[in-house]
Every structure is written in C-alpha cells, then in structure tokens.
Image (spheres, rainbow, N blue to C red):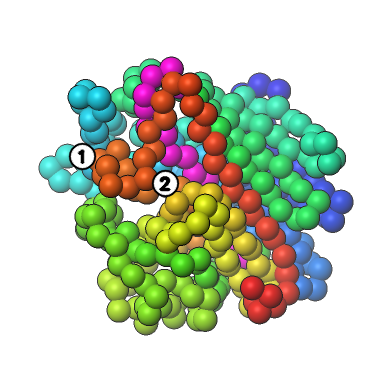
Amino acid sequence: MSGNQEEFITLSNGNGLTASFASYGARWTSMCVPDNKGHLADVLLGFDTIDDYKYAFEQYHGAVVGRVCGRIRNAVFNLNGERHELAANDVYGKPVRNHLHGGIEGFHRKAWNAKRLMTEKGDEGVIFTLFSPDGEEGYPGNLSVSVTYVLRADNALEMIFEGVTDAPTHVNLTNHAFFNLTGDFAKTVSGHLLRLDACSLIECDENLLPIGRMIDLQNDSLGFHGDMSIGEAIARSRQLSVNDGGISQAYAFNEGTEHSIYLFEPMSGRNLRIVTDCPSVQVYNAYLMDGSDKGKGGVALNRFSGIALEPQGFPDAPNNPQFPTTLLLPGEVMRVKNTYFFGNGSWQVY
C-alpha cells in the first residue's frame, strides 16, 4: 500500500468498534464507539473526503503534526552553535511570526506510506512511514518517522511514534484529533468533564509561548479536576483564559513516566482515558472554529465543536533548555506511546 492520498484504511475489533485513517497526514479520521445504550457513533471531528481535509480552514484534524508540534518562538532555534531558521507560518509573533506545527508543508500535508498489519494477538493495525529530508521547513538532518495505530480487543486505540535521524534535530510529534463524545457534532463539548493527572500550567504569553514559569493548579478549576464541566471549569478559573471561554493551554505533568487524561460525556456515558508517556499535554477547545468548515454529513463545525487533547513534549523546547529536551541524536530512536481507552458508563469508575 503506497502513500496514495485518496485512501482510507478502516480497522475493526470483535466488539463492533471501528477506527479509520488516511495516508494524507497519517490522519486518524474516525472512531466509532458505543454509548451506554450500545448505540455506535463517530466521536472524531473530520470530513467525508480527502479534499475536505486538504482545503479546510482547520488543517490539523486527526493529523500527525511535526517535526515539532506547537510553536517555536520567532521561527528559529540554535543547535550546536548553528542558527536554524524555520518556516514562519503562525498568525502569532511580532516582529517575526512564530513557527507552528512543523511549518507550511508540515507532516499534516504529506502523503505517508501505509501498510496494514496484524499483531500476534490478532488485533488489526496500520503503520504509516515518512521520510523528511535535511533542510525541510528549516530543520537539520534527514529524519525517518513512523506512526503505528492498532485497534485492540480491549477497545483501546494504541498509537506509537518512532523516529531516527542522521544528524541532531528536534522532534516532537503529536496527533491533533478533535473529540466530541456525544457523537453529534452539532453539539459542543462544553458539557464534557475533563480530568488531568496532577499537573501544572506552563504559563504562556499572548503569543501562546512559554515564559518560563509554572503555575500550580491544585486549587484552580483550570486544572480540570473532573468535578465540573469544561465550560464551567473555564468560567470559574482564577487564571487567565482567552477569547471568552476559549482555551489553548499547555500542561506539564508533575511526576512519573506515565500519565492519564480523562474525558467523559454524561448523557451518552462515553468516556475516554488517554495514557501517555509524554511529559505534557496541550488542551484546545476549538474556539477558533467558526462554522465555515462543513464536517461529516455537512454539519457545520462551530466554536467548541470538539476538544483536542494532544500529548507531546513541552512547547518551544528548542528555545527553553530548562524543559525536557526534544533533541534527537544519531544512533537514538525516538519512541512515544499514547493509548486511547474508550468505554461507556459512570464517571465514578475513575
């Protein structure tokens, strides 16, 4: 199976769950899971055709984002005494625009090669591979990356990123899926409940870039402790949120090597637990969606139609040596694992 941008690949398990993917951006394009009455629905925002993904206002639905996700200040970093100027494609940044999500033609716009697989346990999967040449979007080093998706019998979607390079370079990959556990994309996610493992807010400036300070959220609702809806948590927070209930915040997990993110929708009973070995997560409640994109079935994707929960390395790590590094060296293998457990029932199970 080649990197044909037109192909969708669907995986299924013995419980009726299905997950679909596309070579264009190695995208996770659908995830059909049951509610507490057994009714299946797709819980990923997205589109019906590849062309819709290509020309959408929101470019990143379900895509693998890289080489470095998030923002890099002033679209530049220094490595081993050498200055590397990146594509300056962000709307934020003065006097120089910042680098965002890997650049203008980042991994989300690439035709990845795809190959189906079957695990020893009989689970269906697909592996996408991509070669990024030295100098692409300004990054040094030839980089080979892969993402493997496996739909498991325990109703979990396993996602593993791997990469190798022939020269020092920065790599920070994530998946940019937007979730709406109602299965009805005309509804917002403001009524969902979100809980994060113990974490701190990585304080950012007006350009959504870190300023070097961590904020303890133990006693603030913006820490998302799972005791109130997303909308209420944002409204009650004493910390600054942006754009009238819209948030795009980076959180640093406090300790340990494995962390959990929980999302619950009370009416359907659908829940999601993301287990990650990443040190941080970006939370974005799609406040920039304005209805101009028409999603699956022609439904307008409006403000708060979904929530992106993006496990990743710290934002702008190349310019913040105090953060966990995103540097990949020759001879090393970058490996990141995220597992998405889907269920239905009571929030109290967590």
Q: Position of residue 239 (x, y in %)?
A: 29, 73
Q: Which quarter of the picture shows residue 275? A: bottom right
168 is within the stretch colored magenta:
yes
- Amino acid, disc 1: Asn
Q: Position of residue 142 (x, y in %)?
A: 43, 18
Mark seen at residue 176: none
Whether residue 239 can be seen here: yes
Q: CA distance from mark 2 to mark 1?
A: 19 Å
Tell me the magenta residue range: 165-181
Q: Position of residue 157 (x, y in %)?
A: 68, 49
- Amino acid, disc 2: Gly
Query: Disc 2 or disc 1, which is closer to the eye?
Result: 2
Q: Nearer the viewer, residue 201 or 8?
A: 201
Left or right position of 13 against 232: right
User: Residue lying farthest front?
Assistant: 256
Q: Position of residue 11 (x, y in %)?
A: 76, 42
Q: Which residue is mark 2?
A: 313
Name which residue lies at 72% across and 65% down. Answer: 343
Left or right position of 325 against 184: left
Of pointers 2 and 1, the one earlier in the residue sequence: 1
Name which residue lies at 53% across and 49% down. Answer: 277
328 is within the stretch colored magenta:
no
- Pick the quarter of the image with the C terminus: bottom right
Q: Nearer the viewer, residue 33 or 317?
A: 317
Q: Which residue is mark 1?
A: 74
Name which residue lies at 31% across and 25% down. Answer: 138
Q: Which quarter of the picture shows residue 213? A: bottom left
